[in-house]
Image: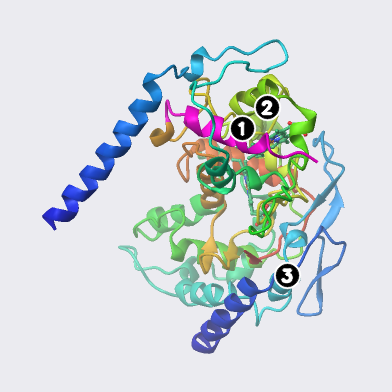
Amino acid sequence: MKRKAFLIIGVTAAFAAMATAQTTAKTIIPDDVVFDEYGAVAMSLTGVAGDAANGRKLFANRKLGNCLACHVNSEITEQAFHGEVGPSLDGVADRWNEAELRGILTNSKNTFEGSIMPSFYRTSGFTRPLEKFEGKSILAAQDVEDILAYIRTLTE
Amino acid sequence: MIKPNLQRVASIVTVAALTFSLNAAVASDLVINEEISLTNETAAPAHLENLTTIYSGWNFRKSETQSLQMDDFDNPGMIFVDQAIDQWNVVEGEAGKSCAACHTGGVEEFAGLRAVLPRYDEEAGGIQSMEDYINECRTDRMQADAWKWSESKMTAMTALIGLQSRGMPVNVAIDGDAAEAWELGKEIYYQPVGQLDMACASCHEDNYNTYIRADFLSQGQTNGFPAYRLKNAKLNSIHARFKGCMKNIRATPYKEGSDEFRALELYVASRGNGLSVEGTSVRN
């Protein structure tokens, strides 16, 4: 019993350490992200190169990216259900450059006015958020960079 | 009666979970027990600016789920209607009365009621839902405890009373004294909320007839409520459904039985004016 508690604390501490390691470099907090007039974000949110393999996992994860809720993606065939609320992301890296894609991921509303697509890296301006999500973004900065690295591989 | 039904439900749930077939808002007819023809598709009411045709949620379900609702013997929700028929005669509370003691004409007295609820009630000074009327009888006339908004006895009783209006067109009033609450309901319907920042309209107006991952979106109509859901194997109230949808978009739901949810219930019901009251629907 005690050992287990220790283990959990240990793991949590390790995660916390990881999170701070990631945030110390030059993580930009959501409210400070700079968008250009078309909604693109030129600067990396963390300064750490994205991990496309991890990004692929986040893309499908229902609690994190859950991008498959709305987008068909032929590169992920092992998942049965691809939503069709948004456009297919096949070849999306040919249509948008890195800064544009980062902008769409960070806050799609700056690129597509009134979009149903959630803003994945935003902490303010929500109405009635559930308490446990208050002041939190859906994705962490590095998650955005990882998903970005992954969707940058989606070329025709 | 109850046991075999439950067994059948169990096997049905397995079948429904294993069978995936593509779907669309098919224009097939919803006929119950091969005799009661329901309106599951009709012209949108005049106040609806962004839709021309309205559809029952039934249209968007897989054929296996659809057929469960087409025969009362297969409809798992009917088990709860049977329970409410028993409850109707149960004496409870200080006044020593059952529902039947006052409603001497039987539950048939309530034919037409579901179709016009929720509605503005002068005495209450606001919008009242079926649950409010049931609880008013329980507390004031029976001197019994109020039921919780979505507890099983309540959803069962709303199912029994609703069934008396099966086939009648939803026809809630939105003008006069109801107008203020209706406007509030409309505002809530179009207000993006939660961390996912979506409104009811984002899914049920802009994207119905579309898959959102494994879920096929309907127009979010309430004419089939209370709805038996295969997912939780019980009857679900309208407010519980609203609550679920709000939590899914990570929004703090209003309370069941709150004025906000009554207003939203009125507004959503009005979007379905013209569709048939289904009695007790089956959804996934």
Is residue B121 something that shows in the picture? no
Q: Is residue B104 above or below residue A123?
A: below
Q: Which residues are magenta?
A: A134-156
Badge 2: few (under 14), some or many (20 or more) residues near its Cα, within 10 Å?
Answer: many
Residue A18 picture location, percent across and down? 34, 33
Q: Secondary structure at mark 3?
A: helix
Residue B58 located left or right of residue B151: right
Q: Amino acid at mark 2?
A: Leu
Residue B46 picture location, percent across and down? 84, 38
Badge 1: few (under 14), some or many (20 or more) residues near its Cα, within 10 Å?
Answer: many
Identify which residue, B103 or A154, lies in the foreground: A154
Identify which residue, A76 or B211, lies in the foreground: A76
Which residue is most to the left? A2
Q: Nearer the viewer, mark 2 or mark 3?
A: 2
User: Residue beneath label 1, please?
Assistant: A148
Q: Distance from label 2 to label 1 (Cα)? A: 7 Å
Identify which residue, A53 or B87, lies in the foreground: A53
Q: Chain of mark 1?
A: A
Q: Nearer the viewer, mark 1 or mark 3?
A: 1
Point 49% across, 57% down: residue? B134
Q: Have a look at marks 1 and 3 and say if they share a chain.
A: no
User: Residue beneath label 3, please?
Assistant: B66
Point 52% across, 21% down: residue? A45
Residue B51 located left or right of residue B250: right
Disc nearer the start of the sequence (2/1) = 2
